[in-house]
Image (cartoon, helix red, strand yellow):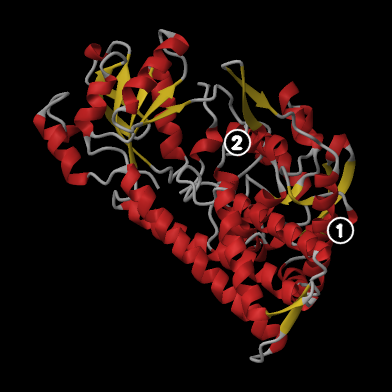
Amino acid sequence: MSPLDESAFMGPGLKLGPHPHSYPERGSSRLEQSSQQTKTTGLRWAGRYQRILFLSDALVLAVVAAAAQVGRFGFDDRDVTVGFFEVAYTYLSIGIAAAWMVVLGIYRTRDPRVVGVGAEEYKRVISATVTLLGLVAILCAVLKIDVARGYFALAFPLGIVGLISSRWILRQWLTKQRTFGHYLSRVIVLGRGKDVRYVINQIQKKSGAAYEVVGAALPHAEEREFLITGSGPVPVVATVGTVVEAVERLEADAVIVAGPVKGGSKYVQRLGWKLEESATELVLATGLTNVAGPRIHSRPVEGLPLMHVELPRYSGAKHVLKRLLDIVLSAMALIVLLPVFAVLAFLIKRDSDGPVIFRQERIGQGGKKFLMYKFRSMVQTAEDDLAGLLDQNEGSGVLFKMRHDPRVTDVGRWMRKYSLDELPQFWNVLLGDMSLVGPRPPLQREVDGYKARVHRRLYIKPGLTGMWQINGRSELNWQDSIRLDLYYVENWSLAGDIIILWRTVKMLINPQGAY
């Protein structure tokens, strides 16, 4: 696998350059004309989208501040004591909204490198809001400001929901624009053929990275006119020595250096100097796979840039908060879903003989065995019938999957489609055997077939949902399933869990890959 941080390309839309047959020859006038016709520079779209986000954030926070004040006090303006002064809540609301905007700016929540792609944008919004809440609490204590707790109890939750929702709506709009070729950064990918191909394939695979690949720059570009990738041929527009001229000719916004190149750091430094004149961005692969951005920190020491990678942590305060979230949400789900459980139990019992709840031994954190609960979706003799179906296995690796498994009942088929058979696992979450979000809970026979590195999936609790759930479910091959699980194990965060839960809800409404 070529060296590249895959998380940099997570998110929705991608447009590769025009179809290769529209390029008569490398460096031709038709190529340049096509560039002029579709050009919307990365700098231009980034600035425009930043302004849209700024106005959207300001509007949301103004509405939130007003809603919190009206919700707590009605339409009568009240005063709050600040030291020896009385200040109207209206001015306090304006001050908090303004401070909120400042903190969102400090946390760079509108940075073009994070907006519209992946979870980092949402994480920064949540972090900025939590920081502001802490600062306000400290300020109120120091200045002895007696602000009604109900005001804050309304303002900050509404603010988080409003900001996340508005940015999600804008992201849907941005994704749609990118499908038409707008709001994309035009890039040239530079490096060895296999590294360039890997980068382009990852951009396409993540469906929505904000790049339009207009060409490739290879060490010996004269040997070929096109580089064949998973998305089709990509024109080879330059060598590593003439990439600057190609940037000017195609008006590219960025050059992505995919892996090591001849000349090493000195070549990259000289390339950066040359690109400065055209304000073109230089993007370097980190050389680290499956490491999320927040775990990577750069620290210069006497002119030497050192990259620090935080080690994954499998205990501590974050895991305590994760457990608290599991307890609260699973308990609420069990209470709310009781009527649904009753209806499903009736349908299962009516459809076929056997118990309503299916119990199966699974392997949890640290190899600990536990009984996982599901609504029965197969005939009662399913386990005994498995041996006769192994030769028809459509799964990969150690998984057994059949698209048209004869053991699945009629009710079980549509329960599986919408993952309704998994609902009893909220009880496993409440007991502590599972978490709301985590790797897929494996069977003992699957664990017995694990290679050494795959055992890292057992470092944390298995999940009711996870990366596998929102990225294709049964359509995933074994390698992709393992890669996603290991990525989650080493890079999980509370904000990321919330986003996975939200995307799971969307997946249940529009199910894909379940059978």
Residue 490 appears at what percent x and percent y? Answer: 71, 34
Residue at the image point whose x is 82% and y is 73% from the top: 335
Towards the viewer: 335 or 293: 293
Residue 120 visible to the viewer: yes
Q: Are marks 1 and 2 in contact (CB under 8 Å)?
A: no
Is 31 above or below relative to 170? above
Residue 81 appears at what percent x and percent y? Answer: 77, 77
Q: Secondary structure at mark 2?
A: helix
Residue 77 appears at what percent x and percent y? Answer: 66, 88
Is 112 above or below relative to 291? below
1 vs 2, front mark: 2
Q: Quadrant of residue 506?
A: bottom right
Residue at the limit of the structure toward the top, as seen here = 263
Residue 119 visible to the viewer: no
Residue 293 numbered tag = 2
Is 367 above or below relative to 207? above
Q: Amino acid at mark 1?
A: Leu
Lower position in the chain sequence, tag 1 or tag 2: 2
Q: Amino acid at mark 2?
A: Gly
Q: How many marks?
A: 2
Q: CA distance from mark 1 to mark 2?
A: 31 Å
Towards the viewer: 85 or 334: 85
Residue at the image point whose x is 79% and y is 59% from the top: 138
Is 173 above or below relative to 339? above
Q: Secondary structure at mark 1?
A: helix
Residue 430 numbered tag = 1
**Within-10-Å neighbours for mark 2: few <14, some 14–19, many 20+:** some
